[in-house]
Image (cartoon, rainbow, N blue to C red):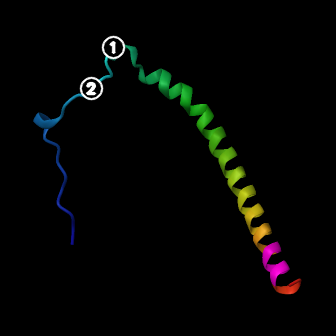
């Protein structure tokens, strides 16, 4: 079974509205790309480290609770 092809109807495409008081000429793709490309990699690395540390901490606390509950009363 295959899905039907998806086609775009150019007559239905409308430009995105800009907020009041802004000018479409103020938006540049290059500045948003260059500003976000370097920090994103660094943030994802930090996020992975934080996630691993939090997982380890939660598992450790859970283990201590189980150990204390079952063996120490």
- Where residue 67 sits, quadrant-wise, is bottom right
Residue shown at 81%/81% (left/top)?
69
Residue shown at 55%/31% (left/top)?
36
Of 62 and 42, nearer the camera is 62
Q: Which residue does the numbered mark 2 point to in the structure image?
A: 17
Q: Is residue 32 left or right of residue 69?
A: left
Percent position of residue 9, x then y:
13, 41
Of 33 and 57, nearer the camera is 57
On screen, residue 23 above or below 55: above
Q: Which residue does the numbered mark 1 point to in the structure image?
A: 21
On screen, residue 39 above or below 27: below
State the extent of the magenta-drawn residues as a range: 64-69
- Under circle 1, the secondary element is loop
- Under circle 2, the secondary element is loop
Percent position of residue 40, x then y:
59, 37
Residue shown at 10%/34% (left/top)?
11
- Where residue 68 sits, quadrant-wise, is bottom right
Label 1, residues with CA under 10 Å away: few <14, some 14-19, many ≥20: few
Q: In this view, does 30 lie to the left or right of 45?
A: left
Residue shown at 79%/74% (left/top)?
65
């Amino acid at each position: 079974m295959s899905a039907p092809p998806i086609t775009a109807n150019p007559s239905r495409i409308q430009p995105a509205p800009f907020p009041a008081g802004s000018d479409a000429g103020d938006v540049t793709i290059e500045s948003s790309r260059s500003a976000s490309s370097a920090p994103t990699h660094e943030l994802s690395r930090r996020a992975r480290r934080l996630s691993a540390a939090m997982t380890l901490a939660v598992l450790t606390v859970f283990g201590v609770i189980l150990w204390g509950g079952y063996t120490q009363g």
